[in-house]
Amino acid sequence: MKLFRLAPLVLGLASAVIVPRKANYDGYQVVRLSVGSDLPKVKNMIQNLALSTWNGGPKANAEVDIVVPADKLVEFQESTSDLNKIVMHKNLGESIVQETEYSDYRLGSANASWFNSYHPYADHIQFLNDLKNKYPSNSEIVTIGNSLQGRPITGIHFYGKGLKNTKPAVVLHGTVHAREWITTMVTEYFAYSFLTGFASDADVQNLLNKYDYYIFPVVNPDGFVYTQTNDRLWRKNRQTTSGSTCLGHDINRNWNYQWSTPGGASTDPCAQDFKGRAPADAPETVVLANFVNKLQASPQKLKLFIDYHSYSQLFMTPYGYTCTPLTTQKNTQYQSLATGVVTTIKSIYGTVFKSGPICPTIYQVTGSSVDYVADVTGAGWAFTSELRDTGGFGFVLPKEEILPSGVESWAGLRFLLGRI
């Protein structure tokens, strides 16, 4: 969910013809800067040097993660010599190369070695199919529609004893923002853990017999593929906008609920959080909304929805569109559940997550999936999570973090499923 705000620098287009260019981050640094009381100074520096940030715009008495090209490092250092800084990536290009050293995937394996590295998109689809083939009595592949470029939005549906499509539904999304690769792996870890644990883990058996699960590890396939072929830090889908040479709509600002509320998304097509020209004008948003609404309209109903993002280590509840505190009994229950999730996550490796409503916990978000699913779809529960880390590596999270992130998040999910 973290933003990557761009000062005017973006893809070159000739008329409406897309000319993608391979992004090169060699020599770039990512620096965490303590803003303190110097907000005007930091804002001016970012604007004057045309820098981008990974965690939204700078705020007073907070930290901002800034991407600094090699040719601007000297000016950046001079401009921030009196401010506290931590270098997250000394050479972003090298960090990306290390992260994208994929392990070979052996067709049909679908075992725990999958979580030792990140993988190409085609292997993710193969992994889901192989997982289904290993557990044909409890799972199936589902495609719920196509992306803008025609890629099927693919998930795995799994269930326990009895007829499928009869028990309350749980829907989990990953990789709505293309560069948040850890979410792909963590949601796949959930599917793997459920299916491999069904035969031997009584708690997993109970959870699979209680709900039907639909996990979609990559709901923005066009953007995800683009991160692997052209620009590791791409966020949005790959949609054009009339009158602009900038590409992409932010799928998590495009849902048809509180879309027009000011402050939680951008109207600038070049912005990373561009909400589109109209609510639900991104085809991926339409597909995802139709699916959750279809489930809710069925006898199953939609019991739980979680949208996984990175980075910040948060587990959040509605709402994103308003920071006004809620005093309802439902919100009290929400906060109790979220607190329990982060407490459980911490019990595994000591990883500290924070919990709370989206808007006051991270920032205002309008046109989001969670608010839509909570109030329009009417699901029983809707949450969003920001996975590892809190700024040591940000979006370019080393492969060594995959498995522990999956294990701790799996513990949090099991806690939640046992209490809703």
Image (cartoon, grey):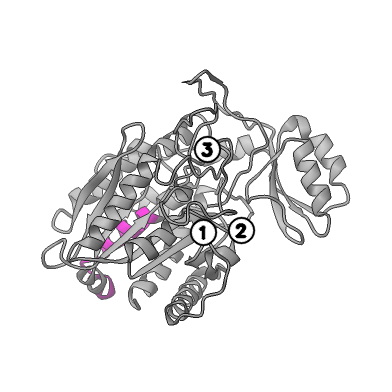
- Which residue is depicted at the point 43% across and 47% down? 176
- Name the residue nearer the viewer: 4 or 323: 323
State whether residue 206 appears in this view.
Answer: yes
Query: According to the image, label 2 marks what residue?
Result: 390
Q: Earlier in the sequence, mark 3 or mark 1?
A: 3
Query: According to the image, label 3 marks what residue?
Result: 234
Q: Is residue 270 above or below residue 295?
A: above
Which residue type carries mark 3?
Trp
Label 2 element class: loop
Label 1 element class: strand
Classed neighbour count for the residue bearing mark 1: other residues with Cα under 10 Å, few (<14), some (14–19), many (≥20): many
- Name the residue nearer the viewer: 133 or 85: 85
Q: Is residue 194 magenta?
A: yes
Which residue type carries mark 2?
Thr
Label 3 element class: loop
Q: Is residue 97 magenta?
A: no
Classed neighbour count for the residue bearing mark 2: other residues with Cα under 10 Å, few (<14), some (14–19), many (≥20): some
Classed neighbour count for the residue bearing mark 3: other residues with Cα under 10 Å, few (<14), some (14–19), many (≥20): many
Distance between the Cα atoms at labels 1 and 2? 9 Å
Which residue type carries mark 1?
Glu
**Rendering coords of residue 190 (x, y %):** 35, 59
- Which residue is depicted at the point 82% across and 50% down? 40
Q: Earlier in the sequence, mark 2 or mark 3?
A: 3
Distance between the Cα atoms at labels 3 and 1? 18 Å
- Number of the front mark, 2 or 3: 3
**Rendering coords of residue 144 (x, y %):** 25, 46
Q: Is residue 157 left or right of residue 418?
A: left
Magenta segment:
187-204
User: Magenta residues: mostly which secondary structure?
Assistant: helix
Distance between the Cα atoms at labels 2 and 3? 20 Å
Query: According to the image, label 1 marks what residue?
Result: 386
